[in-house]
Amino acid sequence: MVTVKKKTIGTKAYYYLEHAIRTARGVTTKEKYLGTKLPGKIEELKRQFLSEIYEERWYPQLDKIKENFSKEQQKTPESVLAKQVRSFSVKFTYDTSRIEGSKLTYRETADLLERGLTPRSKPVGDIKEAEAHEKLFYEILDYKKELTLQTVLYWHKKFFEGTKPDMAGKLREYQVAISGSKFMPPRPIEVPVLLAEFFKWYSRSREKLHPVELAALVHLKFVTIHPFGDGNGRTSRLLMNFVLHKHGFPLLNIFYENRNSYYNALERSQTKKNDAVFVQWFFKRYVKEYKAYCK
């Protein structure tokens, strides 16, 4: 988190921006001198300072991942690429559904999606939503246009029309809570305004931000608005991968086994109103997942 620090030497005050970075060697601190008077637009200066830190620490690794991933893709036969995407789709569907309470095991999810074998004694809703998720995942990978509210509403409707038709593709008009979280989603009356701001922000930012940062922020901002009665997490993770795929970066799966660190990063960002907490977590997770491409 970027903070403003004041240093007094004699009778004179000096202002700095300060940001602590946790690394394998411990915590290091970055500083940026502001002057003897605290300037206006301090929040904008904080964002610029963070961008400078990201550009130095993360962007070279992220760009190397894309470069080596692209080279590998070009050498890989189409049939193998299709198999890799299918394998990711099954794992992604399992983990994203399991995070939200699905009872299907990974083996059951694979048998269902790859072999059409319906698991016994498992909730019908979980089965239908797993099938709908995979179908929607492929549709999103093929989508060439930019994100709009109408598009996301359509995707949500396709996802839930077979299990929750009363709320599929509809913005919530009631208050919701997130089980186990200290964060309370916005009131329903705020949702349309926040979504309008979200898509304006996306339109402004999609060519300015690094694509991996954009993917992280799309996820965070959308799930924080929590516009639907159900499916906010799954939708935000689909949007995250839409952004990564659109810009030629490898897709990211957030594993069910690692959900606690994921939940913590989201909650800390939401309660502190500090996007950098989740973005830093996302960068670390992404680089760890694709460290083989960083060489």
Image (spheres, rainbow, N blue to C red):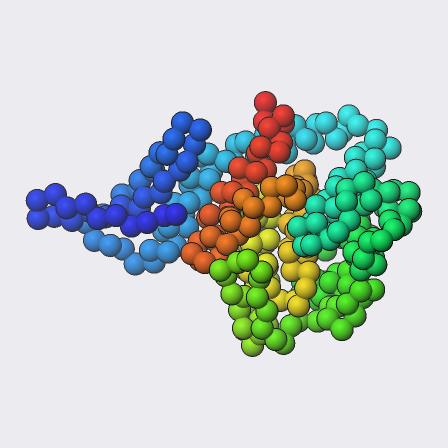
Quarter of the image containing the C terminus?
top right
Residue 54 lies left or right of residue 128; in this view the side is left
Q: Residue at x 59, y 54 (%)?
A: 218
| Outermost residue toward the front in this view | 121
Total numbered circles: 0
Q: Is residue 109 above or below residue 236?
A: above
- Residues 211 and 166: in front is 166
Toward which corner of the image does residue 292 lie, by quadrant?
top right
- Residues 8 and 36: in front is 8
User: Residue 10, image x and y in percent?
Assistant: 8, 44
Residue 6 lies left or right of residue 293; in this view the side is left
Q: Residue at x 66, y 39 (%)?
A: 249
| Outermost residue toward the top in this view | 295
User: Residue 270, image x and y in percent?
Assistant: 49, 57
User: Residue 122, image x and y in percent?
Assistant: 82, 54
Query: Could one spot residue 247 in this view of the protein?
Result: no
User: Residue 58, image x and y in percent?
Assistant: 50, 35
Residue 286 lies left or right of residue 268; in this view the side is right
Q: Residue at x 66, y 71 (%)?
A: 171
Query: Could one spot residue 124 in this view of the protein?
Result: yes
Q: Is residue 87 above or below residue 68?
A: below
Q: Residue at x 79, y 52 (%)?
A: 130
| Outermost residue toward the left in this view | 10
